[in-house]
Image: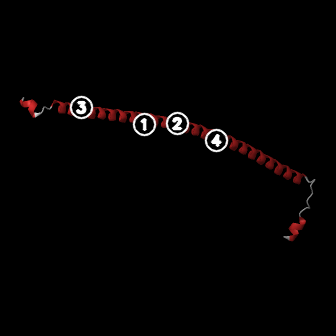
């Protein structure tokens, strides 16, 4: 094994095989760098698209919440108006009963008036 190791030629940077291997390594590294740059660009585009989608969803959700709050306010106003109307009707009925009672009292005659 030592003989085999010793028999190998020393590193010669001018050797065509060494130059070929270094050129292949350099090409692989450049291709890897290009792929990483492309991957980063695609990732940034995807993140930007996702951020835009989330922003649009947030705007839509805020608009829906605003419309829902407006609808609830209108329902509450309608309910309050209906309650006020019912209370007013009850008051009118109560006032009519009081007026009828008062009219009955006025109509009552004393015993002297009845037997003349």
Frontmost of labels 4 and 3 is 3
Residue at 54 percent of width and 35 percent of height: 63
Q: Secondary structure at mark 1?
A: helix
Q: Could you tell me how far apart the alpha carbons at marks 2 and 1 are, in whole angstroms? A: 15 Å
- Looking at the image, tell me whether mark 2 or mark 3 is earlier in sequence order: 2
Name the image quarter holding the N terminus: bottom right
Residue 110, horizontal then vertical, whole percent: 12, 33
Q: Is residue 21 above or below residue 72?
A: below
Give me the disc on residue 99: 3
Q: Is residue 104 above or below residue 9?
A: above
Direction from residue 34 to residue 5 in the image, left or right:
right
Direction from residue 6 to residue 97 in the image, left or right:
left
Bin the neighbour count of mark 2 within 10 Å (Cα to Cα): few under 14, some 14-19, many 20 and up. few
Judging by the rendered image, the residue that carries numbered circle 4 is 51
Which of 32/90 is in front? 90
Q: Secondary structure at mark 3?
A: helix
Q: Could you tell me how far apart the alpha carbons at marks 2 and 3 are, in whole angstroms? A: 49 Å
Q: Secondary structure at mark 4?
A: helix
- Looking at the image, tell me whether mark 4 or mark 3 is earlier in sequence order: 4
Q: Secondary structure at mark 2?
A: helix
Direction from residue 68 to residue 19 in the image, left or right:
right
- Looking at the image, tell me whether mark 1 or mark 3 is earlier in sequence order: 1
The reply to whether callout 4 and callout 1 are in contact (CB within 8 Å) is no
Give me the disc on residue 76: 1
Q: Could you tell me how far apart the alpha carbons at marks 4 and 3 are, in whole angstroms? A: 71 Å
Residue at 88 percent of width and 69 percent of height: 3
Residue 91, horizontal then vertical, whole percent: 30, 34
Judging by the rendered image, the residue that carries numbered circle 2 is 66
Q: Image quarter for residue 101?
A: top left
Frontmost of labels 4 and 1 is 1
């Amino acid at each position: 094994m030592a003989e085999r190791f010793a028999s190998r030629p020393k590193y010669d940077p001018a050797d065509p095989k060494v130059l070929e291997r270094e050129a292949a390594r350099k090409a692989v590294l450049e291709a890897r760098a290009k792929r990483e740059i492309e991957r980063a660009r695609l990732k940034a585009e995807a993140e930007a698209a996702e951020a835009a989608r989330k922003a649009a969803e947030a705007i839509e959700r805020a608009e829906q919440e605003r419309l829902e709050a407006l609808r609830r306010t209108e329902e509450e106003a309608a309910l309050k108006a209906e309650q006020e109307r019912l209370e007013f009707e009850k008051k009118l009925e109560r006032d009519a009963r009081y007026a009828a009672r008062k009219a009955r009292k006025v109509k009552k005659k004393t015993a002297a008036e009845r037997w003349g």
